[in-house]
Image (cartoon, rainbow, N blue to C red):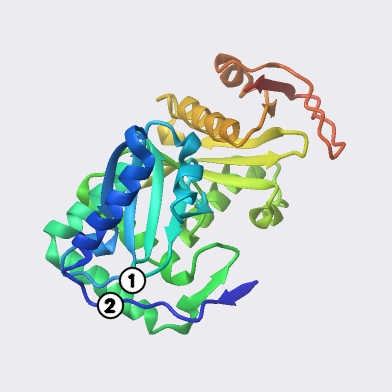
Amino acid sequence: MSQSQKHIEIVPYNPSWPELFEVEASFIKQALGNNLVALHHVGSTAVPGLVAKPKIDMIGVVKDPGDVKEKLAAMGIDYRGEYNIPMHYGFSKRGDVDVNLHIYEEGHPEIELNLFFRDYLRTHSIIRDEYAALKQNLLKDPTSFETKDSPFTQYTLRKGDFIRKVLREAGFNHMRMLKCNDDTEWATAENFRQKYFFDKVPIKDPYKWTFNHNDHAHLILYKGVAIIGYAHLQFWSDDRAALRIIVIEQPFRSQGFGGQFLELIEKWIRINNRKSIHAEASPQALFFYKKHGYIDMPFNNPEGDETHPSDTPVGKIL
């Protein structure tokens, strides 16, 4: 279902934005103390000459995100959630100066991604102006103010392809895991599901209803700006998670990406207090799971479905 946001404001670049960042940063540094490794000014207000929403975007790099929420809440900075980025801690402060603060543990790839994007726009004025024109054109389209099965407006989502283009030109090549979010990511997920699973039956994917269901998560694995993997997780009410699908695109197999994807998934659901992860391993996938520490373990699907006779139920305590 679509909903509309009443207003999105972008304004000309304000030379005082870097100073406002420094002022707000001083409060955050005081609150987080030695846990804070670095604090970066990112987003459009960090790019001289670029039109922007008048909100200061920051990335805080920390050693341990565990106690960050409490300390920031004490200074009036509210936790907003993970959004589409696993292991992202999003905060905001509204007042005389509006701040969006994104907290990541050291080494999270979104840190470098934002710095690559910011620095490329700072040093490539033509690309910066293309981005400004894209923003202004999006605001002329009334549908840009709509949200549809996403926490973000179409204004935000429709910038995705441009951002990927800039990151490609900037040479960003890190591996990162995201929840499916914009049209390009959802289309890739649909393609992976159909090509690697349902075409083998063959049937049309009967489980697209899970794309908009709180008990299911659809994850993609990026290598740079190429989507090379996809996973479908189901969350059960007894603190368990089921890995329904995990797949790496054919040209990227046998390079360790599947194992790295699995490790990211396990870390994410462990942080979210899941005690175990379960899968129904096909004969072709059983070695992969065993290699990564999975053992024979009853699947015990709460929905009552039985494991296919050719599959092996496996699991791992997290």
Instruction: Name which residue type carries label 2.
Output: Val
**Rendered image quadrant of residue 31:** top left
Q: CA distance from mark 1 to mark 2?
A: 6 Å
Q: Earlier in the sequence, mark 1 or mark 2?
A: 2
Rendering coords of residue 275 (x, y %): 68, 27
Q: Quadrant of residue 294?
A: top right
Observer-nearest residue: 281 or 214? 214
- x and y, in percent, of residue 26 in the image: 27, 50
Residue linked to disc 2? 11
In which quadrant is the N terminus drawn? bottom right
Which mark, by number, is residue 181?
Answer: none
Question: Are the residues flagged by discs 1 and 2 in contact, CB closer than 8 Å?
Answer: yes
Give the residue at x 69% y 41%.
234
Q: Residue at x 28, y 45 (%)?
A: 39
Q: Classify 10 Å Cα crowding around label 1: few (below 14), some (14-19), many (20 and above).
A: some
Secondary structure of the residue carrying tag 1 is loop
In the image, 175 versus 108, the foreground residue is: 108
Residue found 18% across the figure and 67% down from its top: 16
- Which class describes the residues within 10 Å of circle 2: few (<14), some (14-19), or many (20+)? few
Check disc 2 and report its element: helix, strand or loop: loop
Q: Is residue 295 above or below residue 144?
A: above
Q: Position of residue 77 (x, y in %)?
A: 45, 55
Relative placement, left or right, of 163 versus 289 is: left
- Identified by mark 1, the residue type is Lys
Which residue is rendered at x = 49% and y = 69% of the image? Answer: 153
Q: Is residue 204 visible?
A: no
Q: Is residue 158 visible?
A: yes
Q: Nearer the viewer, residue 95 or 148?
A: 95
Name the mark on residue 53. Answer: 1
The answer to whether 103 is drawn above or below residue 290 in the figure is: below
Quadrant assignment for the C terminus: top right
